Image (spheres, rainbow, N blue to C red):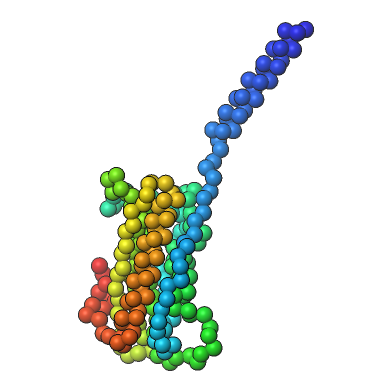
Amino acid sequence: MKRWVLAKVLAGSIAALLLGACSAGNARPQLQQYQLAIPRIPLELLHADIPEIGDVSAAPPYEDTAVVYQTSPTQLGIYHYHRWISSPTELVRDYMEKLVGSEDDGQPTRPHKLILEARIDGFNELDEGDQTFGVVDIRFCLRRSHSKPKTTSCWRDRHLTVASDRSASAVVDAINRSFEETMVELSNQLTSRLGGGLQQPQRSKEALEQE
């Protein structure tokens, strides 16, 4: 009788161990979500010179919430379980609106208002040799609406920040710092360009789109 009880206990223990091993083997990684956290960037412009935010678009890899990594000039991948709380297009638009204070302030509509647009070509981890970077690469265009012809001024801003290691949290922190530098540079560009009026650029928006 004792042998039978012992055998039953051992069988139950082995079954429990096997079930636990199978459950551990089938467990999925936990989803991690990230957000940007940069301080408010000051922008000193007269109300008449403050642009409204127009189209904010992105290359296909950055239209989704997955964090993107790049291992060579021609190869990109995504982390399925590491994601932004919103797509980079939404995150960038949100901070651009905060920068220019584009919420309704009760001021009358301007007939020839300025429009600020953006195209995201990089918002990712970059692995080069034994170093990992957080990359933000955005092309901005500033134009005046209802003008004939439309006057457009475009420029590109690209920042790389070295990550402390290759963990997802370190990469996100590096992207965050690169994005902060991008917003500071955007503030400087708007102040410089609009302080002296919107000038006709040497290269048109259409020419830049062909790059």
Q: Percent position (x, y) of residue 189?
A: 32, 77
Report the front residue among 204 and 178.
Answer: 178
Residue 56 visible to an observer of this rendering: yes
* Residue 64 against residue 118 in the figure, above or below: above
- Give the image location of residue 131, x and y in percent: 30, 48
Location of residue 205 with respect to 179 vertically, above or below: below
Residue 74, percent across and down?
28, 52
Residue at 59 percent across and 33 percent down: it is 23
Residue 150 in view, yes or no = no
**Picture quarter with the C terminus:** bottom left
Toward which corner of the image does residue 146 lie, by quadrant? bottom left
Residue at 26% in and 69% down: 210
Residue located 50% across and 61% down the image: 86
Residue 140 vs residue 75, the one in the foreground: 140
Quadrant location, the N terminus:
top right
Q: How many discs appear? A: 0
The residue sitting at the right extreme is 1
Quarter of the image holding residue 149? bottom left
Please tell me which residue is depicted at 41% across the width and 51% down the height of the picture.
170
Q: Position of residue 71 (x, y in %)?
A: 32, 48
